[in-house]
Image (spheres, helix red, strand yellow):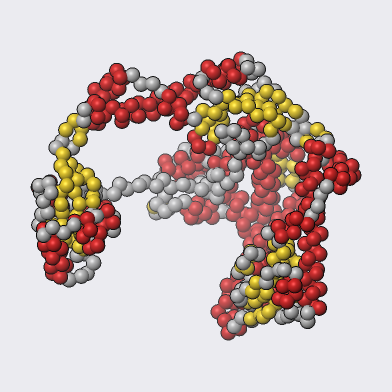
Amino acid sequence: MFDLFRSRDKAVRILLGAILVVVALSMVTYLIPGSGSGSMTGGQDNVIATVGDQKITTLDAQKALQNVARGGQVPAQYLAIYAPQVVQSLIAERALAYEAQRQGIRVSDEDVNVSIQNSLPPGYFQDGKLVKKEQFEAALAAQNLTVADLKADTARQLLATRLRDIALEGTVVSPAEIEKIFRQRGQKAKIEYVIISPAKYQSEVKTDDAAMKQFYDKNHSQFQAPAKKSISYLVFDPAQIESSIQVSEADLQREYNANLDKYRVPERAKARHILFFTNKGQNEAQIKTKAEGVLKQLRSGADFAAIAKSTSEDPGSAPKGGDLGWITHGQMVKPFEDAVFSQKVGDIGDLVKTQYGYHIVQVQEKEQAHLRTFDEAKPEIAATYKKQRLNDVMQKALDKAQADLRRDPNHPEKAAADVNQPLQHVDNVTPGDPLPLIGVAKEFDQATGALGKNDVSQPITLPGNKTAIAVVTNVTPAHPASFDEAKPQIRQTLQSQGLEVILTEKSSDLIAKTKENGGDFAKAAKSMGLEVKTTPDFDRQGAVEGVGSATSLPDAFSKPVGSVFGPVNSQGNRVVGKVISRTEPNMSDLAAQSASIRDEIKSRRARERNSIFEDGVRQKLLKDGKIKVHQDVINRLVASYQQS
């Protein structure tokens, strides 16, 4: 609550830069006088595809991929996977635009202008004219787009959209379909169910060496021992390096003398208070009377801290006995500050009225403005000096360690000794193995994954602000696994298979016993030592404890009441259940929801039909020779991202 009556400057206004998403933006030449036309195209060996007379180049694809990576939609390391999809998207859009033109659909300059103005943030246009030219040009540059590119993009997008709209017109949704969705959404079910967990039967699965050897002999070609590496590495911990930096007395004195203003302490006072709010609509006269009564108690010797804890309305300081800590000029609203710096130490002054209410103030200590001595400031100076030198010291150590390892990769202990860092060594590790001082770190695995014997890594940034440098001392290539190497995997496989058999048997036994007990699901489960749970009413959008989403239990809504269903696989378990009851929705609500349900069905169908429609257009144009795809160029594009 201390913050409530501290004085505040006007809040600094944070200027939020508008991010222009230029995927659908475009601009016509007359809006930016002097803008050129035409776009960059490569030679024939850079043409990915042609649609009609329009060429799609590797540059077009690279721009699209750059924007995807810049927007954070896809990590850079996955661009090689995403590249073919980008290419297909570029082809599909141009194919739709081409077909639209063949069908006589046209887009005017006015259509493009309206689309532009609707795409830009408010304020970019006034009276139909672009007034924020510099911001717009900066946005284009950030997206690697020219004005001509954007103009063509907008026209293509409008053509493609109009063709889609024509093709998807006339979607009809019947009342029966709407009612079906309404009933499905409004239905509620209640079930009894049992979760049959693998953990319960883990001990029943036996895997001995003979069984594993037999399995290995039949399936040995399936088992491969992964490549393993022996690695020596140094881990640089900034905290340890900072603590080891030596600072001379002369250096500290020089820093002190050069920055005396940093060590000047203003006049300050240590105070505590009790606050009674008056800004919450209460009767102020009554509040003042209450405050005067408390003031009288304190002046009669009552414990200030105890009274503050029980009566003060400042939630920040009341639990601390009203303690506000040290206060300097300008921190508090003026009436409070005047009281603090005018009262004598130990005195309990008269009531202080501020915009927040009535305060009872006691000053506990005061300090006059002064310059901290060198000895007082020395610990702070030393800590700051070390932090300032840390980056330089650490970079030099990393550079030296890397150079030493590259010069003599067979003796990493020498490099470690030169930079005074302990050397770690691990033999025959695979990605994902925990490492001393590092644990499991994907950053380390990625950095060392492509290294061969005697190769040295770049500095590897690790969690915890640590950095490592590694040298690979040996590589054991991947090879067909021997029986001993394959045993852990075989054991896991046999255990999984054995558990699968047991879970299937237990599920079948439960269903059979329920029938034997005349449909008494709970009795059957109890006879098998299984726990039965009963759900409250739930709908298809709900969840079931221990099972998860209700979508994994469709039989709860389709099977007749009293039916036993399952087994259902859920989160590694088997679930067997019995439908206890089902509640139908209130049909009087159907009329109110019909419109929204109809729109949802139409939207879903539009998406489905659009995919089919786009593929049909593309296949037709391919057959007619209007689309030509150069797969070798696409392959080179993808390969360029795999190598980067």
* Residue 244 point in image, percent of width and height: 43, 24
Quarter occupied by residue 457: top right
- Whether 284 is drawn above or below 462: the answer is below
Which residue is drawn at the image coordinates 51% and 48% (left, top)?
21
Viewer-proximal residue, 585 or 521?
A: 521
Which residue is drawn at the image coordinates 68% and 42% (left, top)?
81
Query: Residue 293 vs residue 499: left or right?
Result: left
* Residue 518 point in image, percent of width and height: 78, 81
Query: Residue 145 vs residue 225: left or right?
Result: left
Q: Quadrant of the C terminus?
A: top right
Q: Is residue 600 visible?
A: no
Q: Quadrant of the N terminus?
A: bottom left
Q: Is residue 410 visible?
A: yes
Quarter occupied by residue 205: bottom right
Query: Residue 312 vs residue 557: left or right?
Result: left
Which residue is the extreme one toward the top? 407
* Residue 160 point in image, percent of width and height: 64, 54
Q: How many marks?
A: 0
Which residue is the extreme one toward the bottom? 588
Which residue is drawn at the image coordinates 11% and 60% (left, top)?
300
Which residue is drawn at the image coordinates 41% and 23% (left, top)?
245
- Whether 29 is drawn above or below 462: the answer is below
Viewer-proximal residue, 590 or 567?
A: 567
